[in-house]
Image (spheres, helix red, strand yellow):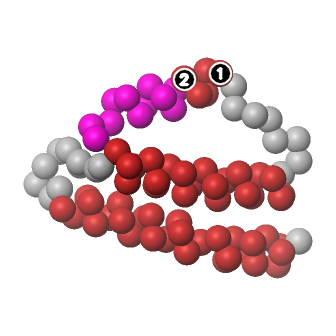
Amino acid sequence: MDQEIGKFVERRLHPVRVSVSLMNQQLELAKGSKDVVVDADLFESLITTFEIFLEDYDGRYRENVRPQTMSERKFVEAAKATIKI
C-alpha cells in the first residue's frame, strides 16, 4: 500500500508545488512588510488546490472520513475574513 500511496501523491504534487511556489513569490514581493496582499481569486484558487488534494486522498485512502462540522466550516470562513485580500 505504501507504493500505491506514493504513486497517488506523486501524481498530485505538481499543483501543490505550483501553489507553494506562488505563495513564496507573494511573500518575497511583500518583503519588508507585515502584510501579504493576494488577489481574492488567486487565494481562492490556492485553497481549492489544497482542498482537491485532501479530498482525493481522503476519498481513496482514509476510511470513515467524517465531513467537516459546522464549527470547522465557521472557523475556515472566519479565518478567510481576517485575511487581507
Q: Amino acid at mark 1?
A: Met
Q: Say whether residue 84 is magenta.
A: yes
Marks 2,1: beta carbons within 8 A: yes
Q: Residue at x 37, y 29 (%)?
A: 81
Q: Residue at x 83, y 58 (%)?
A: 60
Compared to 43, does 22 lie above or below? below
The spot of residue 38 in percent (x, y) is 28, 50
Query: Which image quarter is the C terminus in?
Result: top left
Which residues are the magenta region?
Answer: 75-85
- Report the side of 47 relative to 56 (left or right): left
Q: Residue at x 60, y 50 (%)?
A: 51
Disc marking residue 55: none
SS class, disc 1 = helix
Residue beneath label 1, please? 70
Q: Residue furthest front?
A: 41
The spot of residue 73 in percent (x, y) is 59, 28
Compared to 54, does 80 lie above or below? above
Compared to 14, does 52 lie above or below? above
Residue beneath label 2, please? 74
Query: Which image quarter is the N terminus in?
Result: bottom right
Number of labels in the image equals: 2
